[in-house]
Amino acid sequence: MRKTVTTLGLMALGLGLSAPALADPVADMAKAGCTACHLKDKKLVGPSYKEIAAKNKGKADAVATLTAKARAGGSGVYGPIPMPPNPMAKIGDAELKAAVEWILKQ
């Protein structure tokens, strides 16, 4: 019994050491270059994260729509300046989705 408990404890410790770090959407957005055009509460080149959240409040498909929009880029929603596409090499799908979810909480 003692050997089983020790083995399970070591396995749990091993799993903890190999688990990925918690997602940090703010760091991921900075790394991807989002902060070159967007700030949390002030318009820069693009809208603030708070403005994006307010415009999409209550929309059930907001995460999917904004994720697709960020991935593809586009213009006309917040003004004439286009947002460039954000390819997988710049920010992965999971990180992009987490970033959009974070933005919508602002």
Image (tube, rainbow, N blue to C red):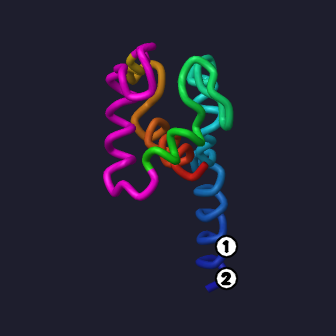
Extreme-bottom residue of the structure:
1
Which residue in the protein does label 1 denote?
A: 6
Mark 1 surroundings: few (<14), some (14-19) or many (≥20) residues within 10 A: few
Using the image as rendered, state which of residue 88 and residue 59 is in the foreground. 59
Using the image as rendered, state which of residue 52 and residue 98 is in the foreground. 52
Q: Amino acid at mark 1?
A: Thr
Q: Which label number is shown at residue 2?
A: 2
Mark 2 surroundings: few (<14), some (14-19) or many (≥20) residues within 10 A: few
Residue 64 relative to residue 27: left or right? left
Give the vertical position of 11 relative to 31 (above or below): below
Q: Residue at 46% x, 53% y: name it.
A: 57
Mark 2 to mark 1 CA distance (whole Å): 6 Å
Q: Residue at 62% x, 56% y: name it.
A: 14
The quarter of the picture where residue 6 lies is: bottom right
Magenta highlight range: 57-84
Residue 67 relative to residue 38: left or right? left
Q: Residue at 62% x, 17% y: name it.
A: 36
Give the vertical position of 76 relative to 23 (above or below): above
Residue 64 horizontal/vertical position (percent): 33, 44
Residues at badges 2 and 1 in contact (C-beta under 8 Å)?
A: yes
Q: Residue at 44% x, 42% y: name it.
A: 97
Magenta stretch: dominant SS? Answer: loop
Residue 72 horizontal/vertical position (percent): 32, 23
